[in-house]
Image: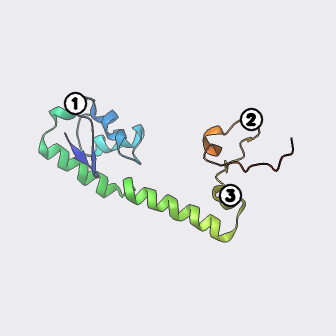
Amino acid sequence: MARIAGVDIPKNKKLAYSLRYVHGIGLHTALQICELSKVDPDLRVSDLSSAQEDALRKTILDLKILVEGELRSENLKNMKRLQDIGSYRGLRHRKSLPSRGQRTKTNSRTRRSGKKTTISLGRK
């Protein structure tokens, strides 16, 4: 099993689709990485040589792509910055509500599901 950017990528899939298991790498970026490292994207991960794996790792470092922990921390810093300056988006993040203008009356169940409702005082 190949390990790239701290993630074990599946060995039975093609390389371009297997690289997508790394947080921060999509299909377009995976194909770009394969092209720059001169590795066939249709090759199975189990058929990769160690030199090809090293070339993939080196290409990811050379492109300066934020992946995994660095990307997550960058996103958290951006959200914290928005909350600190008191912007509308920051307030929406703080309240765990959608921050990009979606409706909340009927949708956004997954975003709002963690909230606990308070007990009413006998009024119905």
Q: Is residue 27 left or right of residue 47?
A: right
Q: Is residue 100 left or right of residue 1?
A: right
What mark, if any, has residue 62 been given in the picture? none
Rendered-image quadrant of the C terminus: top right
Q: Residue at x 51, y 58 (%)?
A: 75
Camera sees residue 83: yes
Q: Position of residue 9 (x, y in %)?
A: 27, 40
| Disc 2 versus disc 3: nearer the observer | 2
Camera sees residue 65: no
Q: Which residue is mark 2?
A: 106
Q: Is residue 18 above or below residue 117?
A: above
Q: Position of residue 63 (x, y in %)?
A: 34, 55
Tell which of 124 and 7 is nearer to you. 124
Point out the tag, 2 or 1, that comes first from the N-terminus.
1
Q: Which residue is mark 1?
A: 44
Q: Is residue 66 above or below residue 109?
A: below
Q: Which residue is mark 3?
A: 89
Considering every residue shown, the one lying at the far right of the view is 123
Number of residue marks: 3
Question: Label 2 vs label 1: CA separation?
Answer: 44 Å
The kind of secondary structure element at disc 1 is: loop
Q: Residue at x 20, y 49 (%)?
A: 55
Q: Is residue 100 above or below residue 80?
A: above
